[in-house]
Image (spheres, rainbow, N blue to C red):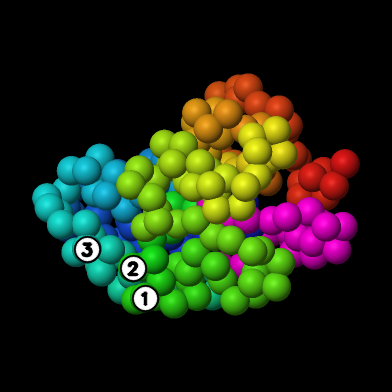
């Protein structure tokens, strides 16, 4: 969802930066450095930040309070919704695998939902971080999707924008497509496909 369908980087990272600054005014973290947490589970983010917040729920609550201030900046990337509608019309089965946590959605609603209302007509399933023991980068989420749908590895193309997406696809044995339009990865990524824009998915 984030970084692939929705452009949430500014909102999510700005909110996280606000939290970090409030907890540690002398932090060396910057907006740019915190973008590394896009696509990370909340607990992993808390542990790596090391700012003295010992409870993931507390970090979540602080983050949610602040992300609301940036909600108007969250929108689908150009062309994404048209491509999703086209794929659905062509009979492609669409599913979501996300690091979003269902507890976030309970507090934040659509901004953090693993299945936003506008996507429900097109996506049959959404696997969130809450639905598996080990969220991305572990393969559990895709394996869960396969278990629920009966889809086989060679039928799946997993599209994402982070290294955790790459690792999730690799360890679950499915093909990966890099959503270059939302990606910040600096290194060369070995994957089946690199999509410069959403319309490249069609071909």
Measured in 3D between alpha carbons, the distance from the residue under mark 2 to the one under mark 3, in whole angstroms, is 9 Å
Q: Is residue 25 left or right of residue 64?
A: left
Q: Is residue 9 rendered magenta in the image?
A: no
Residue 106's disc number: 1
Residue 193 visible, this angle: yes
Q: Magenta segment: does it hold 83?
A: yes
> Mark 2 or mark 3: which is in front?
2
Q: Which is more toward the observer, 165 or 96?
A: 96
Relative depth, front residue between 43 and 156: 156
Q: Is residue 73 left or right of residue 58?
A: right
Mark 3 or mark 1, which is nearer the start of the sequence? 3
Residue drawn at 88 percent across, 41 percent down: 203
Residue drawn at the location 41% of the way across and 36% of the way down: 138
Classify mark 2: residues with Cα within 10 Å, few (<14), some (14-19) or many (20+).
some
- Quadrant location of the N terminus in the rendered image: bottom right
Q: Is residue 79 above or below residue 165?
A: below
Number of callouts: 3
Above or below, 97 relative to 15: above
Magenta residues, start to end: 74-97
Question: Marks 3 and 2: in contact by CB < 8 Å?
Answer: yes
């Amino acid at each position: 969802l984030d970084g692939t369908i929705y452009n949430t980087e500014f909102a999510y990272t700005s909110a996280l930066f606000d939290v970090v600054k409030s907890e540690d005014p002398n932090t060396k973290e910057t907006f740019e450095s915190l973008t590394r947490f896009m696509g990370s589970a909340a607990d992993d983010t808390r542990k790596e930040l090391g700012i003295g917040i010992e409870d993931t729920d507390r970090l979540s609550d602080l983050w949610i309070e602040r992300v609301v201030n940036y909600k108007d900046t969250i929108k689908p990337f150009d062309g994404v919704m048209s491509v999703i509608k086209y794929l659905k019309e062509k009979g492609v089965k669409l599913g979501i695998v996300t690091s979003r946590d269902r507890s976030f959605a309970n507090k934040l609603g659509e901004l953090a939902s693993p299945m936003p209302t506008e996507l429900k007509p097109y996506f049959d399933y959404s696997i969130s971080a809450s639905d598996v023991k080990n969220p991305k980068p572990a393969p559990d989420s895709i394996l869960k999707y396969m278990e629920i749908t009966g889809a086989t590895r060679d039928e799946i193309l997993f599209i994402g924008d982070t290294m955790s997406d790459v690792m999730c696809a690799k360890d679950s044995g499915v093909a990966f497509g890099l959503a270059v339009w939302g990606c910040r990865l600096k290194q060369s990524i070995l994957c089946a496909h690199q999509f410069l824009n959403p319309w490249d998915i069609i071909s």
